[in-house]
Amino acid sequence: LVRLRARLARSQNSLGKGLLTLLSREHLDEDTWEEIEETLLIADVGVVPTQELVERLRERVKVLGTRTPADLRALLKEELLTLVGTDLDRVVKTESGEDTPGVIMVVGVNGTGKTTTTGKLARVLVADGRSVVLGAADTFRAAAADQLQTWGERVGARTVRGPEGGDPASIAYDAVKEGIAEGADVVLIDTAGRLHTKTGLMDELGKVKRVVEKHGPLDEILLVLDATTGQNGLTQARVFAEVVDITGIVLTKLDGTAKGGIVVAVQRELGVPVKLVGLGEGADDLAPFEPEAFVDALIG
Ligand code: GDP
């Protein structure tokens, strides 16, 4: 966890120090507030959350007796935590019925890290003593099924796959059927994320969801978002949120050039909690999203 925090901190220290320096200025004039606003926007916090935060900071700084670095840090932490949300349910659900496995569908634009996230999640579950079946329903990207199967072999999970270009829904159906037959605990379904037509995407993901639900309820639909794509990623996320009922967000590539403020923006925009974060390409680089650790890293 310390290692993960260190990585998170490295990618995100653009926000806190700058803000604290600005808030420490002797005269907090309009120019300074504008700079504060800019700093937040550059950190990908998003327009509406930025405005809210600046308003809150303005009010609170006014009534703050002293403005020591510690006071300002505490205040900033509190307000950021409020924005990120401390009481959201961030547990990835994996339990359905007695005889049916928990089923998680993983969706998102190609390249965001869907397959990798599915593999990492399988590893976490297997390490936790759960048996996992993987469904390679991303039949659009040729290498996706191989990639998923490699993950499966590595972590000890069977992969159900179909012919190249096959019907994603039928693969998803078969994967859950296999999961039931094997008495597996969890079935993870990787899906394709081509975005060229919204109706195409809607049809495909809707169908996958419907056939999976023939076996029993879906526990989660996790949307994978590449944090380095910032506000563009948010636009894509919106499309997915219109197509399926997202229950949680996985923000990947937070170890890279991503700006941490995107967490705030994406949650606010979609009204869905960030549940997991991707912090690298390795098998162990998936972590639960912890608001407090995150905000600490964000402030630096
Ligand atoms: P998909 O098309 O959405 O299934 O994307 P992939 O799972 O194939 O991932 C695309 C690329 O992103 C691969 O090179 C992954 O190794 C990389 N990737 C995925 N998650 C992370 C992450 O959290 N951090 C970093 N640095 N790279 C990641």
Image (cartoon, rainbow, N blue to C red):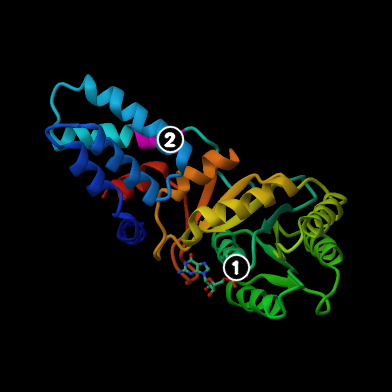
> Which quadrant would residue 20 be assigned to in this image?
top left
Q: Image point 45% across, 37% down: which residue? A: 49
Q: Is mark 1 within 8 Å of ligand 1?
A: yes
Residue 69 in picture, x, y percent from top left: 15, 37
**Disc 1 target residue:** 119
Q: Which of the pair 159/86 is nearer the observer? A: 86
For label 1, the SS is: helix
Up the image or down, 273 lies above or below 276; here it is above
Q: Please, what is the three-letter code of the amino acid marked with disc 2?
A: Leu
Q: Label 1 to label 2, Cα distance in Å?
A: 30 Å
Instruction: State yes or no: residue 82 in magenta.
Output: yes
Residue 79 in picture, x, y percent from top left: 35, 32
For label 2, the SS is: helix
Residue 215 in picture, x, y percent from top left: 85, 51
Labels 1 and 2: the sequence-earlier one = 2
Q: Which of the pair 297/161 is nearer the observer? A: 297
Q: Image point 34% across, 60% down: which residue? A: 11
Up the image or down, 271 lies above or below 140; here it is above
Up the image or down, 243 lies above or below 65; here it is below
* In this rendering, position of residue 173 left or right of residue 18: right
* In this rendering, position of residue 93 left or right of residue 38: right
**Disc 2 target residue:** 83
> Which quadrant would residue 91 be assigned to in this image?
top right
Magenta segment range?
79-86
Q: Is residue 272 visible?
A: no
Name the mark nearer the viewer: 1 or 2. Answer: 2
Q: Is mark 2 within 8 Å of ligand 1?
A: no
Q: Quadrant of ligand 1?
A: bottom right
Q: Please, what is the three-letter code of the amino acid marked with disc 1?
A: Gly
Instruction: State yes or no: residue 159 in magenta.
Output: no
